[in-house]
Image (spheres, rainbow, N blue to C red):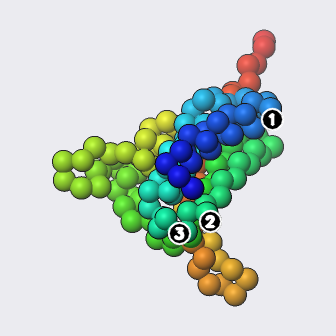
Amino acid sequence: MTAAAGRNARLLARTRLTVARWTGDVEDAARIVEKLVDNAVRHTPVDETDKIQVHLYVDSADQLLVEVDDPMPELPGFFAALAGQPAGEGEKPRGLWCVQEAGAELAFRRRRDANGMVMGKAVQARLAGAVPEVSA
């Protein structure tokens, strides 16, 4: 994966969500995919970036789950990012904080193999589809 990985993931997500006719804000979702992939690339050693995967799931309630898997088991600063706290003194919040500000519910889980050994993590962002109009 390269510096263009986030942009490429954004384009693919936009295309797939449009073809799937997801009713939510496709542009916001595509930007969220880009941010999550950029974060994964930034925090994964170069020789491990080929293990980053993106999954998009739409459930029966039309909620979108974006999941970005990477080989790094830890996510330092996750809760600080959710609280809008900068990573370092004088820094502006970015990455996960921006994803949350775009309206996504964030979570992460450690991925394990069949023997229970930690193999990395999955960062998840959940977005709602459009609220259907109700006619009287």
- Report the quarter where the N terminus lies: bottom right
Q: Which residue is mark 1?
A: 20
| Residue at the image position 40 percent from the left and 51 percent from the top | 82
Question: What separation in Å lies between label 3 and label 2 (alpha carbons)?
Answer: 9 Å
The answer to whether 5 appears left or right of 135 in the picture is left
Q: Residues within 10 Å of mark 1 (few under 14, many from 20)?
A: few
Q: Position of residue 94 (x, y in %)?
A: 37, 45
Q: Which is nearer the eye, 102 or 3?
A: 3
Q: Earlier in the sequence, mark 1 or mark 3?
A: 1
**Residue type marked 3:** Asp
Q: Which is nearer the eye, 45 or 10?
A: 45
Q: Earlier in the sequence, mark 2 or mark 1?
A: 1
**Residue type marked 2:** Lys
Q: Which residue is mark 3?
A: 47
- Report the quarter where the C terminus lies: top right
Q: Which mark is residue 51?
A: 2
Q: Residue furthest top?
A: 136
Q: Nearer the viewer, mark 3 or mark 2?
A: 3
Residue 62 picture quarter: top right
Q: Residues within 10 Å of mark 3 (few under 14, many from 20)?
A: few
The answer to whether 99 appears left or right of 112 in the picture is left
Q: Residue furthest bottom?
A: 115
Q: Nearer the viewer, mark 2 or mark 1?
A: 2
